[in-house]
Amino acid sequence: MPLMPALCMSLLQDKPSARKVTELLKQAMNGQARVLMSAVNYGEAYGIILREYGRDRATTAMNAVNPLPIDVLNITLKEAIRAAEVKHKYKLYYADSFAAALALEQKATLVTSDSDFRKLGHGFPVLWLKA
């Protein structure tokens, strides 16, 4: 299940959705789930923390995330094209389209609190978390 940068932030800031994210990560540790994130979305998470809190805190936060059972997947040209197609079809932000494309490719449930993903419609599996 692709994990969105906002969820990394909820975990780091102990927001209401942090409990569910922690539960998903425990399932991944036990081999019951696979948690995925594209390298683009990893960079987006770093950028959000960098903008809000500065380089030192961003580095510290990502160092805390790195050991978690999140598979950060590099992006190929094929995947970049697929993300652009998803962006065009669903009118998503480009970084968001990588998470959606990853979910489609992996036949996975997208885990997010971002209401922009409502544009994907009911046929797209999304686990909605409270922001």
Image: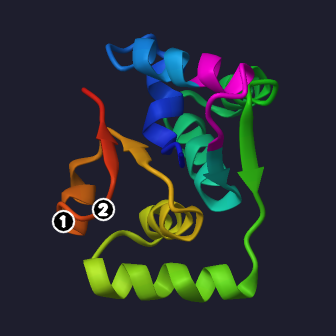
Question: Residue 78, position in %: x, y?
Answer: 68, 87
Residue 75 falls left or right of residue 124? right
Q: Which residues are magenta?
A: 25-35
Determine which residue is flagged by label 2. 124
Q: How is the image coloured?
A: rainbow
Question: Residue 38, position in %: x, y?
Answer: 65, 57
- At 74% from the left edge and 25% from the top edge, which residue is drawn? 68
User: How many angstroms separate mark 2 from mark 1 (CA)?
Assistant: 6 Å
Q: Is residue 22 found inside the magenta-colored segment of the image?
A: no
Quarter of the image where one finds residue 39: bottom right
Residues packed near mark 1 inside 10 Å, few (<14), some (14 to 19) or many (20 plus): few
Quarter of the image where one finds residue 112: top left
Residue 25 falls left or right of residue 62? left
- Whether residue 131 appears in this view of the structure is no
Task: Specify the amino acid type for callout 2.
Answer: Phe
Task: Specify the amino acid type for callout 1.
Answer: Gly
